[in-house]
Amino acid sequence: MLDIALWISLALILMAIVFNTFRLLHGPSMPDRILALDTMYVNSIALIVLLGLWLNTKTYFEAALLIAMLGFISTVAICKYLLRGDIIE
């Protein structure tokens, strides 16, 4: 049962990444592209967690946590740059 759930979730997450890639390449504005990139890193975290479940190791969960923190900080920095033109005040 777990194998079936992993395959279904893998297919859905890959489909979400494809849609995010389309939005990233053809987004009408810069905030749309930033949101697509933000969603892509969330989907990549989901893929890493699925790989950790599949291989039954805890290392992938720690990597997913690190990527989540770096992704949040980078999204805040990019948004701050777009709003103010400068990251550090």
Image (tube, helix red, strand yellow):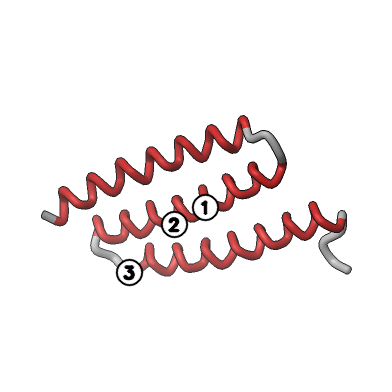
Q: Quadrant of the N terminus?
A: bottom left
Residue receiving disc 3: 58
The reply to whether discs 2 and 1 touch (Cβ–Cβ < 8 Å) is yes
6 lies left or right of 71: left
Q: Position of residue 25 (x, y in %)?
A: 61, 32
Pinpoint residue 32: horizontal percent, then vertical percent.
Answer: 64, 43
- Counting other residues with Cα less than 10 Å from the Cα at mark 2, is it few (<14), some (14-19), or many (20 or more)? many
SS for callout 2: helix
Disc 3, SS: loop
The mark found on residue 45 in the picture is 2
> Marks 3 and 1: which is nearer the front?
1
Circle 3 packing at 10 Å, graded few (<14), some (14-19), many (20+), is few
Residue 41 lies, with reference to residue 21, above or below; the image says below
> What amino acid is labelled 2 in the image?
Ile
Residue type at numbered disc 3: Lys
Residue at 73 percent of width and 55 percent of height = 78
How many marks on residues?
3
Badge 1 is on which residue? 41
Residue type highlighted by circle 1 = Tyr
Horizontally, residue 51 falls left or right of residue 20, namely left
Q: Is residue 16 left or right of residue 53?
A: right
Q: Could you tell me how far apart the alpha carbons at marks 2 and 1 are, in whole angstroms?
A: 6 Å
Q: Residue at x 42, y 69 (%)?
A: 62
Q: Nearer the viewer, residue 32 or 65?
A: 32
Q: Position of residue 58 (x, y in %)?
A: 32, 69
Quadrant housing the C terminus? bottom right
* Of the image marks 2 and 3, the number of the one nearer the N terminus: 2
Q: Secondary structure at mark 1?
A: helix
Task: Tell me how far mark 3 sits from mark 1, CA to CA.
Answer: 20 Å
Name the foreground residue: 63 vs 88.
Answer: 88
Q: How crowded is the residue under tag 1: few (<14 C-alpha within 10 Å), some, or many (20+)?
A: some
**Residues at marks 2 and 3, CA–CA distance in whole angstroms:** 14 Å
